Image (cartoon, rainbow, N blue to C red):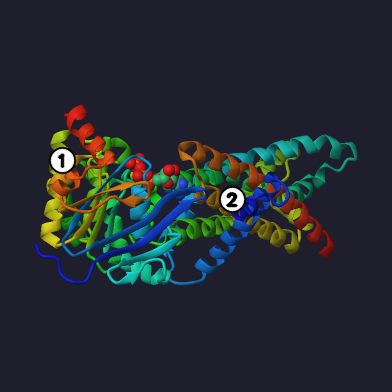
Amino acid sequence: MEKKSLNKFLISKKFDTFFNELTNVFRFLGLYFKETFTSPFEWKETVNQCFNVGYKSLSLVTLTGFIIGIVFTKQSRPSLSTFGASSWLPSLISIAIVRALAPLVTSLIAAGKVGSNIGAELGSMKVTEQIDAMEVSATNPFKFLVVTRITATTLMMPILVLYTGLMGMLGAFINIHQNELTSFTAFIKNAFSTISFLDIYSSLFKALCYGFTIGVAGCYQGYTAQNGTQGVGKAANATVVIAMFLIFIEEMLIVQVVNAIR
Amino acid sequence: MKPTETPVIELKNLKKSFGDLAVLEGIDLTLFKGENLAVLGKSGSGKSVLIKIISGLLKPDSGLVKVLGEEVNKITPKELQILRLKIGFSFQNSALYDSMTVRENLAFPLIRTRPEITKKEIDMAIDKVLEDVGLSNTINQMPSELSGGQKKRIGIARTVILNPEIMLYDEPTSGLDPITCLDINDLILQVQQEYQTTSIIITHDLTCAKMTANRVTMISEGKFLKTGSFEELFAMDNQDIRSFYNYNFTHEK
Ligand SMILES: Nc1ncnc2c1ncn2[C@@H]1O[C@H](COP(=O)(O)OP(=O)(O)OP(=O)(O)O)[C@@H](O)[C@H]1O
Ligand SMILES: [Mg+2]
């Protein structure tokens, strides 16, 4: 009888499961930091995963970065030329790309591509007992699967963001070169006249945060997947939704902080 | 084969429940070196849960779990990892790593547990174990390209490749044709005789139990009914045992 009443919900079922989940996420994070900084380290597998993350998103971010550069230039031109200021096009574009577009677009793509992949992969390993199998063959599955993936997404995201930014600038340059006949050196000079190191650092910092978010969301959802194959789909889906949502929240917070510093 | 004095696996009053569902309600077992125990029981009676507790994958609610003299649920994760090198676990659904070929699946436990092992030694171990399960031709295939029975055999191969002292087989012959069943039974016996392993074999297949085990038991309502030889168990006047026996030997055969 007494045991029954203990099982009753504190507030309501939804709230309770939400806070339960939140506690579990923090435990998961705690375990990540503990396992990341204690030996043995899975260097080889981490490098593998880094390669995986980069390789998987490369073609997609190349294309998107390039197209965003072109489209954004095209769309901004009319409003600038109304003021006869189309020579400022490169600096406008570079600010937009470096400060906002590159980190945001890259991480949203990575959330869809890499995040869902991690969620589905770990989810299916979980529900088919492959994670248990790893554990009984004396391998720490948390270290081998989770730590390597979260570390990989965190480290690779800044690189991908830089790369997307360069692709975007390339797209912008090609469009501006065709229309305004601006030379490469003039473009670079104008483009970099307005961005500061703070802009670049803050973008790289954002990238680290977003990469970490994607890794944690995917690994947590996958590692805690339940209920057979249905759970795998749910894990992949929840990863993308949660990662994207958190990325926007983080973007808002980081922008506030950076603007205060500026 | 005469059992030595210290038990390899010792369970005392082992209990485990999931929420309101009591699965194991007081399991006692003492298993000595070189013994093969077959565990029978209805689907959902907690057979898989039992061996997961023995290998430390699940924590019991209460009771003693002693494997090779160590209390599985009390030792540190590091110690548990070392203990696990001596325990082989063959999963009910094989649990092969999807993303790896058969060769990589078999090499994985070797590389992970013996970092100093050479490529040649790995190849030799893989060739031998694949020959034992009769699947040498699948070495470069992915698990998704194998049939259910082939997966099962590779799963067993992945377990025996480490020469563990204890083997836990979760339904090694379910879903296999009768001929392959016999091969697997032979393999289990061969492993036991070659390496003097102690095994727990979960099965629904009485032929398998009869062939491979020197003791047989049955889980019913969270407890072992009795452990004894095959004949002893089935001489018992118990409804569960009778129906199990009748089902196996009148419906299937
Ligand atoms: N991780 C878990 N969480 C909740 N319940 C579980 C868990 N694992 C097992 N159970 C429950 O415990 C009971 C026993 O499960 P178990 O897998 O041991 O059955 P089994 O005897 O192996 O059956 P089968 O012959 O079908 O494999 C089942 O009712 C199952 O629902
Ligand atoms: Mg089972």
Left of A84 or right of it: where is B148? left
Percent coordinates x, y for residue A125 in the rendering: 42, 47
- Total numbered labels: 2
Q: Quadrant of ligand 1?
A: top left
Secondary structure under the numbered disc 2 in the rendered image: helix
Specify the amino acid type for callout 1: Thr
Which mark is drawn over residue A217?
Answer: 2
Residue at (34, 59) in percent of width and height: B54
Does residue A70 show up?
yes
Q: Is residue B151 above or below residue A220?
A: above
What is the C-alpha distance between the residues marked 2 and 1?
A: 48 Å
Q: Is residue A145 above or below residue B72?
A: above
Task: Return the residue found at the far right.
Answer: A83
Left of A45 or right of it: where is B137? left
Residue at (65, 48) in percent of width and height: A17
* Label 1: few (<14), some (14–19) or many (≥20) C-alpha neighbours in 10 Å: some
Q: Nearer the viewer, residue A13 or A228?
A: A13
Q: Is residue B112 above or below residue A161?
A: below
Task: Return the residue found at the far left.
Answer: B1
